[in-house]
Each structure stands twice: as C-alpha cells, then as structure tokens.
C-alpha cells in the first residue's frame, strides 16, 4: 500500500502534468494547512519567509536553520493530507548542504521542494540587489538535489530569479542548464511580461512554477497555455493572521469585553480545524473503558 507521502506526491505530480494553472494556498502551520484542505485547495505552499516568521518571528533573512524549517514542514504535513510544496531557499549552503536539505525535507513528507541559485545568505559589504551563483555552481546544486532524492515521486524544482536580476537571456541559459541537470520543474521569480513568459515556455519543456505573475500575464488561461502549472499569489494568510491577533489583543487591552469581540472563528469552525470530532470518537473508542463510543 502506498504511504501517505507517496499518495500526496502523486497528486502533486498530477497537478504538474495537468493542463491547468493551480494557485496553492499559502500555509505556515497545521491549522492553516487544514483550512486549505477543507476549502479544496489542491496543494499548499510553505515558503522560507513564512517559516522564518512562524518559527522565529523574524524577517526573511535566512536566519532560520534547516532543522527548524524541516520540523515545521513536518508539523504542517502531519496535520492534513494536503500536498505541500516548500521553498528550500539555497539549500542552506553549498551542494553538499543541498543534499542534506533534500534528505531532511523528503523525510519530513513534503511533496515538492525548490532549490534556488541566489547567493544566500547576504554576503558582507554594500549591496543594492541580490546576486546569483554562477550557472556552473547553480547546476551543481540541482544535480546534487536530484542525486540526494530517494523517493522518485518527490518533485525537485530548480528555482531562479535571473529574469529580474540578470535579464531574460541569462534566465534562459539557466533553465536550459537546470533542465539538463534532471530537475522535474522550473520555478521562476520576477516574470512580468508576455514576451518573457513566451521565451521561457519556448526554451523549457518542463512544467513551470511562477512566484507570482505580473498584471500583463495574470490571465489563468494564458498561464496554462504556456505550461505554467503552479503560480503563487503571495503570502497574505500570515499577514491576515497577524492583523487579526493584533486587533483582538488590542481590543482586549483597550477594555472591550470578550463577548463583544469581532471576527472570531465560530465554535463550529474551531471544531472543524482542530478535528475535534475525531478526538471525540477516539476518546469514546479508547478511553471510555468499554471499547464502544
């Protein structure tokens, strides 16, 4: 019988092999993943920035460790049956670190992960924009990621921000190299125009993942036609959660009675997202003493 991880990876691959563009839910903890699952999302996206915020309360400056990120990915995956794509940043170091990253995240149960070619963390000295690794080093990271994978169902996506950092010609050279290295999908940041998208789709044969789409290419039908199978739409969920917590705490601090608070989840929704009915059934089955519920 396939494991729950295998089944999720198969569903994620089916999305990549479909003729649609999918918008993943931005998830950052078990409850957000369960909400996405209950709402019918095909997949969730757990970004490095969300990991830094949820685990450390820190900005996205690559101060989160691999073990912290993998642990949170495991918690998210354990709580629902939603396939999870994770942003593994630069693989937490060089190509050998990438191999450890793939090992840890595969064990954590993710359906797919991306490895990028940005020079991270930020080096010492003045810098006004991000820098890229050489194509040779980036390709080495992609090859290492593919080699470290044990479950062939796990999706490895080669990620680059070259479109906005170095230009379309450099981006095309990178996606050719990363596709040849054996990745399963190509993840591009900064694609804004139809010309850029058409050049990328004409160069690559793999499914495409976009980290957002400029207004000129935001049409789902166009994205699907150009083989974009996943397109992120930002990470508003954690911002919404922060605002709701802030407003609720402030209202209580300002003297608003708990019964007058606005925007709270209903008891029914809380029972749903905590799977309270399952726990009630298990309590009846295993704690009531007579083996019946």
Image (cartoon, rainbow, N blue to C red):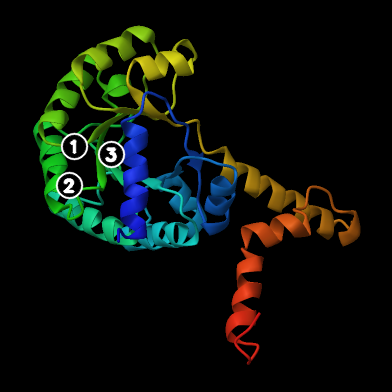
Q: Which residue is mark 1?
A: 183
Q: Secondary structure at mark 1?
A: loop
Chain-order first, disc 2 or disc 1: 2
State whether residue 267 is above or below residue 247: below
Residue 15: horizontal and vertical position, in percent?
37, 34
- Between the residue at mark 1 and the residue at mark 3, the CA separation in whole angstroms equals 33 Å
Q: Is residue 243 left or right of residue 187?
A: right
- Between the residue at mark 3 and the residue at mark 2, the CA separation in whole angstroms equals 30 Å
State if disc 1 and disc 2 touch (CB < 8 Å). yes
Which residue in the rendered view is the most extreme toward the bottom? 289
Identify the residue at image location x=61%, y=63%.
275
State if disc 3 and disc 1 touch (CB < 8 Å). no
Query: Local crowd at mark 3 within 10 Å, few (<14), some, or many (≥20)?
Result: few
Can you tell which of label 3 and label 2 is closer to the viewer? 2
Task: Please indicate, yes or no, whether residue 60 appears anywhere in the rendered image.
Answer: no
State whether residue 23 is above or below residue 238: above
163 or 211: which is nearer to us? Answer: 211
160 or 106: which is nearer to us? Answer: 106
Task: Say which mark, if any, is on residue 145.
Answer: 2
């Amino acid at each position: 019988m396939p494991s729950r991880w295998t089944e999720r990876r198969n569903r994620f691959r089916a999305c990549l092999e479909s003729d649609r563009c999918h918008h993943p839910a931005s998830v950052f903890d078990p409850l957000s993943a369960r909400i996405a699952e209950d709402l019918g999302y095909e997949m969730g996206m757990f970004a490095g920035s969300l990991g830094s915020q949820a685990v450390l309360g820190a900005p996205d400056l690559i101060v989160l460790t691999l073990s912290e990120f993998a642990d949170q990915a495991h918690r998210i995956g354990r709580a629902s049956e939603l396939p999870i794509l994770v942003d593994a940043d630069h693989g937490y170091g060089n190509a050998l670190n990438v191999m450890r990253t793939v090992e840890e995240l595969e064990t954590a149960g993710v359906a797919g992960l991306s490895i990028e070619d940005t020079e991270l963390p930020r080096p010492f000295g003045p810098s006004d924009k991000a820098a890229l690794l050489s194509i040779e080093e980036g390709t080495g990271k992609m090859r290492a990621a593919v080699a470290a994978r044990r479950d062939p169902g796990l999706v490895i996506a080669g990620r680059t921000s070259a479109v906005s950092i170095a230009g379309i010609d450099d981006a095309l050279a990178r996606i050719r190299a990363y596709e040849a290295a054996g990745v399963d999908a190509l993840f591009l940041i900064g694609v804004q125009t139809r010309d850029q998208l058409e050049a990328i789709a004409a160069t690559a044969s793999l499914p495409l993942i976009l980290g957002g789409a400029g207004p000129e290419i935001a049409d789902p039908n166009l994205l699907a036609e150009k083989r974009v199978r996943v397109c992120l739409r930002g990470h508003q969920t954690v911002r919404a959660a922060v605002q709701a917590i802030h407003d609720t705490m402030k209202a209580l601090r300002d003297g608003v009675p708990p019964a007058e608070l606005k925007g709270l989840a209903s008891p029914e929704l809380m029972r749903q997202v905590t799977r309270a009915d399952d726990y009630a059934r298990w309590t009846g089955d295993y704690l009531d003493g007579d083996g019946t519920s």
